[in-house]
Image (tube, rainbow, N blue to C red):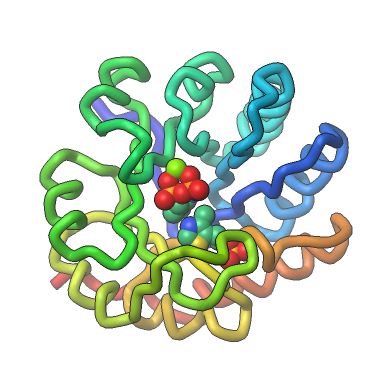
Amino acid sequence: MKGPKLRRGLYAISRETADDRELVDWAGAVIEGGAVCLQYRDKSADADRRARQAAALAAVCRTRQVTLLINDDVDLARHCGADGVHLGEDDGDIADARRRLGESALVGVSCYNRADRAQDMARAGADYLAFGAFFPSSSKPGARRADTAMLSAARTLGRPLVAIGGITPDNGGALVAAGADLLAVIGGLAGTPDQALLAARRYAALFEALPSVPSS
Ligand SMILES: Cc1ncc(COP(=O)(O)OP(=O)(O)O)c(N)n1
Ligand SMILES: Cc1ncsc1CCOP(=O)(O)O
Ligand SMILES: [Mg+2]
């Protein structure tokens, strides 16, 4: 039996910060603005900070009933009680993550601009397929680029689709119209908590304005 469900909407990804309070305030603001899913993404080698911050986000997300995924790190996801993990092509496989996290864990994967990988990952049981970067991203300048045709084609795979990379409230509508179920955003949610809240509202509004694209 599957546990947490992935809702359609804004998928907010954290920026790295040494300031725990700033991270928690940001999380509260984007959730208030309508984010349905959060990802803790910290590529630092500071294991104590990662454990502390992931636990803090887990507490916020539990209280607000928002899905929490951890980037890259299955052990951290298990220790903090997150709903699951996000895995890229070098971050381990779905079956191993499920063995370690349990059957009900959510496991989302990066597919970049690769239709073959998306098909393989859908077969392997990914809970969502992420494509991108759709636009230049200052958070990940070297990210491979994808186009909206990939999203439309991936509707046949029957999995929720996530779009990432340089997404703003102004360019995100085209991705939702092309079939994205979630928009994953880092830089567009930067700033003070008030700024993050207002930006989150604008992303969330894109999903209210546009119906979900049926799987073909
Ligand atoms: C929702 C989402 N999509 C893609 C990524 C990128 O994952 P990956 O390619 O493993 O790169 P890093 O984020 O680990 O640098 C993501 N994190 N989240
Ligand atoms: C992690 C990642 N993978 C592809 S683009 C990207 C960064 C997304 O951040 P932003 O929303 O600031 O472009
Ligand atoms: Mg990764």
Q: Where in the figure is residue 122, as x and y percent of width and height?
A: 17, 49
63 horizontally vs 37: left or right: right
126 horizontally vs 57: left or right: left
* Quadrant of the image occupied by residue 136: bottom right
* Quadrant of the image occupied by residue 5: top left
Q: Where in the figure is residue 78, as x and y percent of width and height?
A: 47, 17
Residue located 54% across and 48% down the image: 37
Q: Quadrant of the C terminus?
A: bottom left
Rendered position, 152 above or below 84 = below
Is residue 8 among the parts visible in the rendering?
Answer: yes
Ligand 3, seen in the image, is in the quarter at top left
Rendered position, 62 above or below 30 = above
Q: Where in the figure is residue 56, as x and y percent of width and height?
A: 72, 26
152 horizontally vs 210: left or right: left
Residue located 45% across and 80% down the image: 210
Residue located 58% across and 19% down the image: 80
Rendered position, 21 above or below 15 = above
Residue located 62% across and 78% down the image: 169
Q: Quadrant of the N terminus?
A: top left
